[in-house]
Amino acid sequence: MNAMKKVVLSGIQASGKPHIGNYFGALRQFVELQNTHECFFMIADYHALHTLKNPVQLRENIIAVLLDFLAIGLDPKKVVLFKQSDISEHTELTWIFDNLLTMPYLMRAHAFKDAEAKNKDVNVGTFNYPVLQAADILLYSPDVVPVGADQKQHIEISRDIAEKFNNAYGETFRIPDALILKDAGVVPGTDGRKMSKSYSNTIPLFAEHEEIKKCVMSIVTDSGEGIPANVYAIHKLVRPEVELKKIYAEKTGKYKELKELLVEDLEKFIAPLRERRKQFERDIPGALAILKEGGVKAKAVAGKKMAEIRQKVGVDIY
């Protein structure tokens, strides 16, 4: 590891197509950070298991996230791209952390509370999600973890767990900070709520033109608005507000024209990413070789840290 650079760790769950909310909430930061930090970016395939029970779909999703990472401009020469399940230390450390935590503490986690409120039959993976995430993070001693605003609590839990371990066994883990992109925050979906696959209100990051058009034309507008808030909130992600304010003032009430302009601007933004992804898709073995090599690098870092942890907790006796 480069001691001169601060370390970054983040990941994407292998659970489906990314949307522009994922990009502006986190992925864009990944690309910017690779030039200033030592970066570890993970495909969180074990995390996906708490909702996805289809092995064929999971394999496809893993490859899809890899292609997404490469398409947005992550450079394997600058970052470590790896798959969570390739590093057994993640699940080993989760068990150690489990024995430091109480159930009431984990019951405060938003994901668990949301699932419980919806009367879902909550599985242990959903309940224990923040602990595995803490292991994901702390193994790599990151200074910062770039996340969307809605993920801030998970970083707070990781910080708590690091402090609990340090207090019990001595100084071991660096306490990471969340890095939230201030000008994006929570990216709105086509219905005005947070953009999320679970709400079916997304605009896919690599959408074809017709799909972009369909999504944009479905954006909810209020007939009483002079400026359609939901359209504007998405539009400002891909065009400077100094330009948009003038345009929207001139086209007050002309929702169809404003949506058509948003379609054009989204196409200009998405098209280069879409074409780059298609290039990588033509050489899946080459992309997988990048992932495998990244796994070797991540394993070296995680293995060294895990050796220290085993010694601290008392299981290393040889």
Image (cartoon, grey):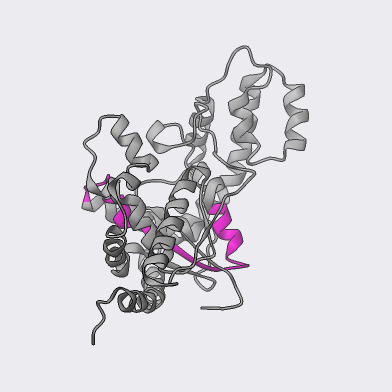
Decide if residue 32 is on the left or right side of residue 89. right
In the displayed structure image, the side of residue 182 where residue 58 appears, left or right:
left
- Spot occupied by residue 139 in the image (x, y as percentages of width and height): 40, 68
Q: Nearer the viewer, residue 314 or 211?
A: 314
In screen coordinates, is 309 left or right of 141?
left
Residue at position x 37%, y 43% in the image: 109
Q: Position of residue 33 (x, y in %)?
A: 59, 62
Residue 18 x %, y %: 44, 46
Work out whether 211 lies above or below 130. above
Q: Is residue 289 shown to the viewer in this render?
A: no
Nearer to us in this view, 75 or 132: 132
Q: Residue furthest bottom?
A: 318
Q: In the image, is residue 28 part of the stretch drawn in magenta?
A: yes
Residue pictured at 28% horizontal, 47% vertical: 103
In the rendered image, residue 168, in percent from the top left (x then y), is placed at 37, 67
Q: What stretch is highlighted in magenta?
A: 27-54
